[in-house]
Image (cartoon, grey):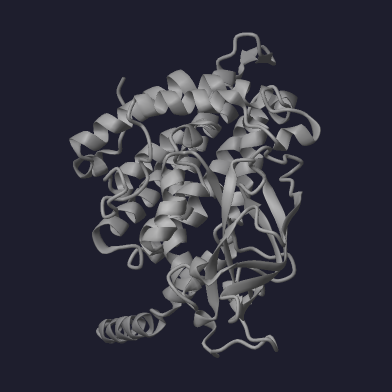
Amino acid sequence: MSVEIPDIVKPLVSQRGLETLIKVKTFVEEECIPADKLYHAQIRNGDERWKSVPPVIEELKAKAKARGLWNLFLPSYYSEGAGFTNLEYGLMCEQMGRSHTAPEAMNCAAPDTGNMEVFARYANEAQKKEWLEPLLEGKIRSAFCMTERFVASSDARNIQLKITVDEERDEYVLNGTKWWASGAGDPRCKVWLVMGKIVDKQGNVSTNDVYRQQSVIIVPSNTPGSVVVRPMRVYGYDDAPHGHCEIQFTNCRVPRSNIVLGEGRGFEIIQGRLGPGRIHHCMRTIGVAEQALRWMIYRAADESKRTFGKLLREHGTMNANIAKSRIEIDAARLLVLAAAHKMDVQGPKAALVDIAKAKVTAPTVALTVVDRAVQSFGAMGVSQDTPLAYMWAGNRTLRIADGPDEVHTDQLGRRELQRVKAIQTEFAKREAKEAEFMAKL
């Protein structure tokens, strides 16, 4: 089996990376995509759907391990990682994005990948031993608790969960509400990374520096004082048994040794976590778009579906939609891979602008292509008889998750406007030169 890679990035893919990419594609097509329907069929009804995991996922995990397709996500600078570049892993993410079960089957599913990167990059050895090792082994799952119900969480400075210090018991005490904690509904979810403000008994922070007020605390999911209130629904889908949950913390106590990196280091941690995670999400959405385009092409060639005496592929509008989808997917892919390569060469901080461009573009393109595919199927496209409706719902969230489009476009717009003086100078010189030339008439 071969795999298509844009010519411009082929020299950046190692032989080992190429071989693994082909293995990933083969595994996704031969094992994961055919298992997706069974996965959803094995989800139980009622409250039972939160108490067990479809058995097929463990079968797929065993097959992935046997093929050496496990924990592919950690970059080469982590000793725990597989050693691939962000660009190489991005290409693998595209293949994983074509199947609902594929990321988890290879232990490369969000939010675990981002959380494992937090543990690998920022945790101490004891924390790694307790949490990173079982996560890498796929024995447990995790959640990241940042978003809050009662503030605008797209501005992380607004996060209000309060963390007080009990000096006598050497503990942190957490009070507040989180929601949209992805993965918190999973019966295998054993640990949460919770972001909040350390305050004194009067509720005051210790510094006026808003970027040093947040901290990240490790909270075992069975800690007294923490309650999963409810699963949130995405266009009616609750994503059981994974879930996106609201969690209430009421005098929830954990040892002070559960701090990650140190007090006031929360912003540093989330920036380190979200950069690579956004690339992973973006490349998976490229895979979603590719799969939706396959469905559209399949529909266009369906001999049983004719309108006005023609196959759908014989209509200009269908051909135009297929062509536009191909162009948009290829352009978005290059944008994401450029950001991944910049991360590899210059580091995540240098790639922030490129990541923002990719984060805005890739989900929007994927949603556009999925919507065209839905339209090509008519009523069937919005039903449970194809995966398209579920694909659209799941990927619509990515225009909000990990920073909404507006945050990224505002950042990009302000950066472009920093060029205003240089552009004004350029225009003034041009106008002066034009006037000089016109004077010769």
405 sits left or right of 356 in the view: right
Residue 185 appears in the figure? yes
Where, by quadrant of the figure, is residue 64 drawn?
A: top left
Q: Quadrant of the N terminus?
A: top left
Q: Residue 108 placed where, x, y %?
A: 44, 41
Give the number of marks: 0
22 sits left or right of 414 in the view: left
The front one of 351 and 322 is 351
Q: Is residue 204 above or below residue 4?
A: below
Where, by quadrant of the figure, is residue 13 drawn?
A: top left
Q: Residue 93 placed where, x, y %?
A: 41, 40
Residue 323 appears in the figure? no
Q: Quadrant of the C terminus?
A: bottom left
Q: Who's the residue at 73% across and 27% down the image?
A: 44
Q: Is residue 353 above or below residue 300?
A: below
Q: Who's the residue at 65% across and 24% down the image?
A: 386
Residue at the limit of the structure toward the top, as seen here? 304
Q: Residue 401 placed where, x, y %?
A: 59, 56
The front one of 5 and 233 is 233
Residue at the limit of the structure toward the right, as seen here? 46
Q: Who's the residue at 53% across and 72% down the image?
A: 256
Q: Who's the residue at 63% across and 53% down the image?
A: 221
The front one of 296 and 142 is 142
Q: Residue 278 placed where, x, y %?
A: 46, 54
Q: Is residue 309 above or below residue 355?
A: above
